[in-house]
Image: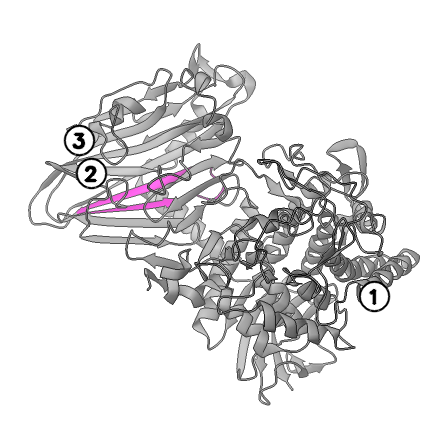
Amino acid sequence: MKYGYFDDSQREYVITTPQTPYPWINYLGSQDYFSLISNTSGGYSFYKDARLRRITRYRYNNIPVDNNGRYFYIREGDDFWSPGWKPVKRGLNEYQCRHGMGYTIIKGTRNGLAAEVLYFVPSDFNGEVQKVTLTNNTDKAKNFTLFSYVEWCLWNAQDDMTNFQRNFNTGEVEVDGSTIYHKTEYRERRNHYAFYTVNRPVSGFDTDRESFMGRYNGPENPEAVLDGKSRNSVADGWSPIASHSITITLEPKESTELVFVLGYVENDEEKKWESPGVINKEKAKEMISLFSTSSGADKALSELKKSWDDLLSRYVLDSSDEKLNRMVNIWNQYQCIITFNMSRSASYFESGIGRGMGFRDSNQDIAGFVHQLPDRARERILDLAATQLEDGGAYHQYQPLTKKGNDEIGGDFNDDPLWLIYSTSAYIKESGDWSILEESVPYDNNPDKAKPFLDHLKRSFHHVVENRGPHGLPLIGRADWNDCLNLNCFSSTPDESFQTCTSKDGKTAESIFIGGMFVSIGKEYVRILEHLGKNDEAKAANEHIETMKDAIIKHGWDGEWFLRAYDDNGDKVGSSENEEGKIFIEPQGYCVMAGIGVEDGMAAKALESTRNYLDSDHGMVLVNPPYSKYHINLGEISSYPPGYKENAGIFCHNNPWVIIAETVLGQGNFAFEHYKKIAPAYREDISDKHRMEPYVYSQMIAGKDAGRHGEAKNSWLTGTAAWNFIAVSHWILGVRPDYEGLIVDPCIPQEWNDFSVKRVFRGSTYNINVKNPDHVSKGVKTITVNGKEIEGNIIPVYNDNAVHTVEVIMG
């Protein structure tokens, strides 16, 4: 069953019922201020850091789901309702939610009164704009009261949920005309406050939650709304909120527009106060003045849309497959940028408290959006490198507000260093900017330990070389890409972290997956060194790569597929010798991506095994058979019920590695078949089963051994977004950047006749038309650029701001 439809012309997903299988959300903001918003107006806002600068309060894991948001109530006579259905949940004559690129429009109609709310975060603005349009569609005048409502979070979202002995005494606000200022803790160590305002005089206000709600009522039936009148309450300790009430009269067919602004302000320490006890509102008033009229909101929305037009114009596909076009051109690229902004920190599954910006996560995300925002990719790479440790390892996470490594999590996730080489390679290929290698970058955020960035790549590479186990394979550390494969944590204690607790010396358990990464990503390090003329270093690095390749073939091959690992006992993991967990997906994909076994048939056997043992109607499971009991030597992976998460769930993040591996072998039919199984637009018709948004990828789908096979979880913030965009754009469609130019090397289903790609690359626009007259999956017969045939399949860099026509004949 569908719950809406794609409007590709507007780049929107239109939801036609508020009762979706799970809250379907959107993200607002792209710089420092961010909001999550659901199709019923749920969600919250924060500045930079969802833990340390949480602006509004949200209640995760609650009944019913999606509690708290930025709500509006309309009180007309004895009736009251909300335009987004929640929180009142009173029936609407009409409902629609349009999730677009950085904005959401929610419209509800009841009793002939239409209320439409546009939510967005303008570019270069630390606040959320809410434009409310009210229309009387009847032939009689209407008199009603509009109430707004948000609940302030007391900044630190962790402390906000736990430290009640303090928090129930700290709430402070100021009210100035139509603006409510939240200044809890401003008197002491904070120099920031938030505000909520509307661009017309108000009939009343509330800033104390209990006064507005009533002691035993909730957002679904606040006493102030029931009575049709605000209390004009001023929070004094307890829980501060912000609510305006505005009495409105509309003549028949008349409309009116109001603009609300939810904003964040930081003051210089010496300019905190306007007068004793009164906050300095100068910056807030400047922000408010921008939206004193509806035209200000309209102008800001137009500018936001133009910015997305530009971002989404740099890789544009035209094919006969409508669903493929919308994934490549709109939603996958949009999700890549959102995932870059958030890493894995703030979604409807990540509370924004437990995780900061992931080192491996963010490095992988960079490859998915670098063609759109190379400057921000560069900045992120250097931020990540600054959290690296001197031995080449890295903090697994850092806090976005401070950009300092997260001591609570620490390091020793031994795949992390290689991802820094991966992202740097992707950045240089896209931008041609080799100067990044000369930047002075600290270790452990210590300026006294700064070295040229190239030194960071060298230590990343050699961290693997210097941390190998008994078989010459990379030591896994606390974990590799799969944080739930914990071969050095033999845990039997409840609540103990599998990732941060190690009970073994870490000198035995090895990862074949990291070995495949080392061979694949290490080749990029060699190419970087060769470009710099460091041929001796490149030769030495290549020897290490060949040694690793030999070790994988000798000790990492199980006969029909690649092993996953060796545990602390030196026993095989992911082997036909195992009773459970015989085959894992990760090494099959990455080892073939690295080219291991391509020439001798091992790679083909490995991919055939993935199809035979891991594939399902909803994608490839991570491991098969699943673990039916807890294995102390394997850790968290075996703690999940069969078919969920890492224990044989369909981890959508690693399916693209198999997709790419299939293209390495020229298997375009298999590659595209795998792609369609997990791409959300192709799953829209089964939204009842899939449950998550049909416009963005989820982290996982319940596997074939699960009772709810095909049900997705953990949508939006996942490396799936970047890797699927790479898989389809770089490897299936085959248009990908390289150090010396733009490679065109498609690997497509044989039935395809043609397709075209517009690609902006290093200052030029390439209109690439691909024809497949012989119906092959892979192989380029000829390429002509501007009417002239070129040798090979690398289009040179022109950097001339011109448009170049490229004709490609496959065969």
Q: Which residue is mark 2?
A: 74
Q: Which residue is mark 3?
A: 226
Q: Is residue 8 visible?
A: no
**Cα–Cα gap, marks 3 and 1:** 74 Å
Q: Residue furthest right?
A: 536
Q: Is residue 535 inside the magenta stretch?
A: no
Q: Secondary structure at mark 1?
A: helix
Q: Residue at x 53, y 84 (%)?
A: 751
Q: What segment carries the magenta color?
A: 114-135
Which picture quadrant has residue 447?
A: top right
Three-letter amino acid code at the position of disc 1: Lys
Q: Secondary structure at mark 2?
A: strand
Three-letter amino acid code at the position of disc 2: Ile
The percent coordinates of residue 315 (x first, y second) are 55, 65
User: Does label 3 or label 1 sit earlier along the sequence?
Assistant: 3
Up the image or down, 794 lies above or below 704; here it is: below
Three-letter amino acid code at the position of disc 3: Leu
Which picture quadrant has residue 622?
A: bottom right
* For residue 201, side relative to residue 302 (left or right): left
User: Does label 2 or label 3 sit earlier along the sequence?
Assistant: 2
Q: Residues within 10 Å of mark 1 (few under 14, many from 20)?
A: few
- Say which mark, if any, is on residue 146: none
The percent coordinates of residue 12 (x first, y second) are 38, 58
Q: Secondary structure at mark 3?
A: helix
Q: Is residue 105 visible?
A: yes
Which picture quadrant has residue 731?
A: bottom right
Q: Which residue is mark 1?
A: 554
